[in-house]
């Protein structure tokens, strides 16, 4: 049997079965900042029917057991798209959402002018388009420690960032755990290094930026897809020797 990391061996299902579901709701009659701010929820899961079909091939479960199979939750993400040329002031729209998103807005926008901050314009190769904020990326405990975060986030960004100039995030704990100030700093450093694997770079005041116009962004996502394929192969080698 192939030797794999304990975290991989403990995964409850084949990672290759994971799918991402995107949800964005808005009223037909626009309220407040809905024409400027889009909130997207992305759910990572393994569908019950897909898992049951896989188990029917690779296990001896009877039909009753297969019928009882449920969806497997893997994680969830939230993104906020800010339309820079929408009907509303972009920072006011961000400020109406959450303090975390507003804090990112204060760093990447010229709040008074309602445009990109001068430092950001100098950083981006082509500062024309919308802003996408990666607000939360949370993996369920059973799926942590195997490198899934970057490939999930990178895949979602690839689909949500069309027409965006940049993606911004502020690395930090997002799952509600009580942490000391030192622990918060350690988490921010580790997550900052993790997000560099999909193209984020430190910008200012704890905010990291991903330039959507760089070929490097696509190249890094391709690397993550390669690592994900290796993860799937390692899981199958362990569970189906």
Image (cartoon, rainbow, N blue to C red):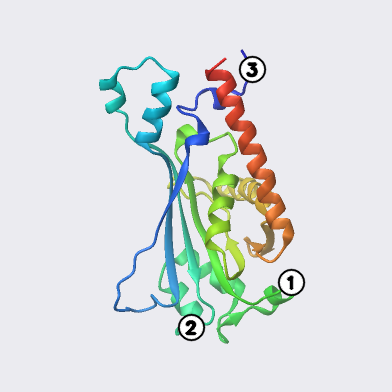
Task: Please report the residue visible at 48 percent of the width from the left and 50 percent of the height from the top.
Answer: 174
For the residues bearing labels 3 and 1, Cβ distance under 8 angstroms:
no
Task: Please report the residue visible at 39 percent of the width from the left and 29 percent of the height from the top.
Answer: 53
Task: Please report the residue visible at 49 percent of the width from the left and 27 percent of the height from the top.
Answer: 11
Give the image location of residue 153, x and y in percent.
55, 51
Answer above or below: position of 68 versus 18. above
Answer above or below: position of 188 versus 17. below
* Quarter in which the C terminus is drawn: top right
Q: Secondary structure at mark 1?
A: loop
Residue 125 marker: 1
State the CA–CA distance, disc 3 to disc 1: 44 Å
Q: Which residue is mark 3?
A: 3
**Quadrant housing residue 228:** top right
State the CA–CA distance, disc 1 to disc 2: 24 Å
Q: Nearer the viewer, residue 64 or 187?
A: 64
State the CA–CA distance, disc 2 to disc 3: 55 Å
Please tell me which of labels 3 and 1 falls first in the chain: 3
Residue 89 marker: 2
Disc 2 packing (10 Å; few <14; some 14–19; many ≥20): some
Please tell me which of labels 1 and 2 falls first in the chain: 2
Is 217 situated left or right of 34 in this image? right
């Amino acid at each position: 049997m192939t030797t794999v990391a304990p975290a991989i061996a403990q995964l409850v299902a084949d990672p290759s079965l994971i799918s991402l579901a995107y949800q964005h709701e808005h009223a037909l009659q626009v309220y407040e900042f809905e024409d400027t701010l889009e909130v997207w929820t992305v759910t990572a899961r393994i569908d019950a029917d897909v898992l049951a079909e896989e188990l029917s091939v690779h296990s001896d479960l009877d039909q009753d057991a297969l019928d009882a199979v449920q969806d497997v939750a893997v994680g969830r993400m939230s993104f906020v798209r800010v339309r820079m040329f929408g009907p509303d002031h972009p920072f006011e729209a961000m400020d109406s959402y959450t303090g975390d998103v507003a804090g990112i807005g204060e760093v990447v926008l010229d709040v008074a002018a309602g445009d990109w901050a001068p430092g950001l314009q100098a950083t981006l190769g082509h500062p024309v388009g919308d802003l996408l904020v990666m607000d939360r990326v949370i993996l369920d405990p059973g799926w942590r420690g195997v490198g899934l975060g970057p490939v999930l986030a990178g895949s979602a960004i690839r689909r949500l960032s069309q027409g965006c100039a940049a993606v911004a995030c502020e690395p930090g704990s997002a799952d509600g755990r009580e942490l000391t100030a030192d622990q918060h700093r350690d988490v921010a450093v580790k997550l900052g290094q993790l997000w560099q694997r999909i193209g984020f770079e430190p910008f200012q005041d704890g905010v990291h930026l991903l330039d959507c116009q760089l070929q490097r962004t696509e190249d890094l996502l391709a690397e993550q897809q390669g690592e994900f394929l290796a993860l799937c192969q390692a899981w199958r080698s362990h569970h189906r020797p």
